[in-house]
Image (cartoon, rainbow, N blue to C red):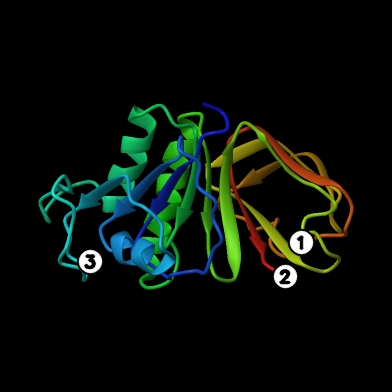
Amino acid sequence: MESEICYIFAAGEQTPCDIQLSSKDLVIAADGGFDYLEKLGLRADIVLGDFDSVTRTDLPADSIRYAKEKDDTDLFLAARTGLEKGYREFAIYGGFGGRLDHALGNIQVLTFLSRQGATATMYGDRFNLRVITDGTLSFGKDLPENRPGNLCSVLSLSDISVGVTIQGFKYELSDMTLTNAYPLGISNEFTGKKAFINVKKGTIAVLWYLP
């Protein structure tokens, strides 16, 4: 299922996007993400949440309703559902915007997915973010974000991230150790060259701005 994507739409900012869904992709609306999908004109395969933020009243009959008082956030429930159905690539929309604590919690959801061996990217209005555990993120030189001067930051989410290598950017690192108490990787810049970021052991967040 490497080419099959689990799309999750949450109740944050409704970023414009052009998604061409395949029949094998899974689309999950997490609570107010159902409103988001309506505006985009996209299907919802699964609708779940406690439904405290959705405005539509025509929820599907098979919607999965959870109690408002629960340990898991709606986005976490959606992520876990995608994993249980066998998906290992996740694209999350509506995870930024609104409350800062929600955005931080959503980054923790990406961390959870990353540590389960999944690839997860959260797409925003001005920037995108991916969490990587013991792995690599590459940027081709023809990507729109890979233009000289565009910003990209790398932050350690684990206490220690070992063997961090950053190549093809203005500021390069080779086999460095990053910690979650020192923001060494803030405000790097693309150069237009093929680039990559690798961490041998640990979990890092990579955030890049959109052109």
Per the image, the residue denoted by label 3 is 54
Q: Which mark is residue 211?
A: 2
- Numbered badge on residue 144: 1
State whether residue 149 is above or below residue 42. below
State the residue at coordinates (82%, 47%): 195
Q: Nearer the viewer, residue 65 or 77?
A: 65
Q: Residues within 10 Å of mark 1 (few under 14, many from 20)?
A: few
Label 3, secondary structure: give it. Answer: loop
Across and down, in percent, residue 102 comes to 35, 62
Residue sitting nearer the eye, 1 or 169? 1
Cβ atoms at labels 3 and 1 below 8 Å apart: no
> Gap between marks 3 and 1, in whole Å?
33 Å
113 sits to left or right of 156: left
Query: Which three-letter amino acid code belongs to the residue tagged 1?
Result: Pro
User: In the rendered image, which quarter is residue 53 located in?
Assistant: bottom left
* Image spot of residue 52 (x, y percent): 17, 65
Q: Position of residue 89 (x, y in %)?
A: 52, 37
Q: First in sequence: mark 1 or mark 2?
A: 1
Amino acid of disc 3: Val
Q: Which one is earlier in the sequence, the residue at label 3 or at label 1?
A: 3
Q: Is residue 36 left or right of residue 172?
A: left
Q: Secondary structure at mark 1?
A: loop
Toward which corner of the image does residue 169 lie, by quadrant? bottom right
Amino acid under label 2? Pro
Q: Please say if the residues under marks 1 and 2 sit with CB atoms less than 8 Å apart.
A: yes
Question: How far apart are labels 3 and 2 at the CA level?
Answer: 31 Å
